Image (cartoon, rainbow, N blue to C red):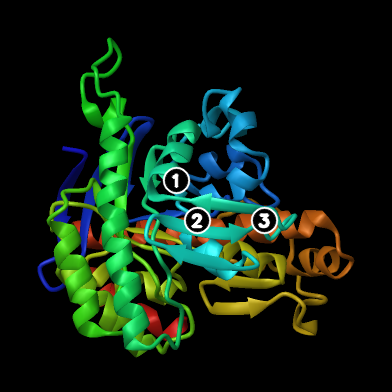
Amino acid sequence: MAFKIINKDVRTAARTGLLETKNGMIETPVFMPVGTIGTVKSLSPFEIYDEGFKIMLSNTYHLFLRPGTDVIEKFGSLRNFTGYKGSILTDSGGFQIFSLAKFAKIKDEGVEFMSHIDGETHFFTPERVIEIQQTLDSDIMMQLDVFSGPGAKREKAEKDLETTLRWAEKSIAAKNAGEDVRPTAESKTAAKNGRLLFLITQGNFFEDLREKSARIMSGMDADGYAIGGLAVGETKETMLKMLEIAASNLPENKPRYLMGVGTPSDIVNAVSLGVDMFDCVLPTRNARNGFVFTSRGTVNIKNSLYKSETLPIDPECGCFCCKNFSAAYVRHAFMSREIFAQRLLTAHNLHFYQNLILRIRRSIENGSFYDFSKNYSSLF
């Protein structure tokens, strides 16, 4: 079994667990920094790992376009190419195809799209996406899915869901066909020896479609299940309602992954609904724009309030930035457009997220998660 639940909260659906991948054990709940092209912007893979992040996310669409799978294949794996010591989950690129590519034409067998880099036309099938991720040697692969987008009519959402369900079956077949689960001297389990495949539930913002997607995919016996298509402009109430429906209809004994979400309070709320895994560009993107997560809430380092501040950005934080530099110095470096400032703020925000995850795990373990969750969301 690749996933084992360790603790359950008695008042919510929150739980802690262990997810076994071929490159290590992952404690859940877990937040995955986004290294879209194999690098988390401004930080080294060693800094990410040393901060405690034992798994990061990269993107199949972007890596396929640049540097190309032929380059990565020469190194044996994306992990070898980047030098990252942890596990890697690769998103299938479905969201990027529909949000970045110059056009995307869905067909029964796959999707045709033009690269946002050079305009070259490509065609992704569910099988081809699995093949690419096998070349990347991802610890966790994601199926190709169809992202309907906000404002989609029910007819389109239904059609896109049916396509996603068909592609899920094809993805499982492709993964099984290419999987080598023969035990080695170092590994006696299929989980360590093989790659995991997560399916992606969709359904837009229609409650019955969200339930249908989760229910049908639950019967496909994947290694884990993701919840996609949320946090794309809908209200928090709608997002949480769709999330609750999806999560409650997914297998309890498999990891649940909420894609692309979110704020600290989003993570706390999602954990309470039984979600185990998260990724989001928010901490790193916000850092590059001067927005910092602190124990007092989110602050803007550009604010003149910090021009002469002798204290750290967050006196309660133990990150490298806050242990060594004043808010005034960091603001000065940021306003001077020094790359070092972006590195400091990115390291700080990721430390904040990692600390949040550790606090969530501890509160579930000691039975205080319900109180923690109710007291937390007001800040963010």
- Amino acid tagged 3: Cys
Whole-Å distance between the Cαs marked 3 and 2?
Answer: 33 Å
Residue holding disc 1: 129
Identify the mark at residue 115; answer none if there is no mark. Answer: none
Given residues 5 and 327, the one toward you in this image is: 5
Q: Is residue 356 left or right of residue 257?
A: right
Q: Is residue 7 left or right of residue 72?
A: left
Quadrant for residue 63, please give it: top right
> Mark 2: which secondary structure?
loop
Q: Earlier in the sequence, mark 3 or mark 2?
A: 2
Task: Tell me what residue is drawn at x 56 percent, y 71 percent.
Answer: 293
**Residue 317 picture location, percent across and down:** 55, 61
Whole-Å distance between the Cαs marked 1 and 3?
Answer: 39 Å
Given residues 160 and 49, the one toward you in this image is: 160
Identify the mark at residue 93; answer none if there is no mark. Answer: 2
**Badge 2, how many Cα within 10 Å: few under 14, some, many 20+?**
many
For this orientation, the residue located farthest to the top is 185
**Residue 23 picture location, percent across and down:** 38, 30
Given residues 116 and 355, the one toward you in this image is: 116
Quadrant for residue 177, please give it: top left
CB contact under 8 Å: marks 2 and 1: yes
Task: Tell me what residue is drawn at x 65 percent, y 30 percent.
Answer: 71
- Amino acid tagged 1: Val
**Residue 99 picture location, percent across and down:** 57, 70
Task: Tell me what residue is drawn at x 62 percent, y 66 percent.
Answer: 100
Q: Is residue 283 left or right of residue 115?
A: left
> Mark 1: which secondary structure?
helix
Residue holding disc 3: 321
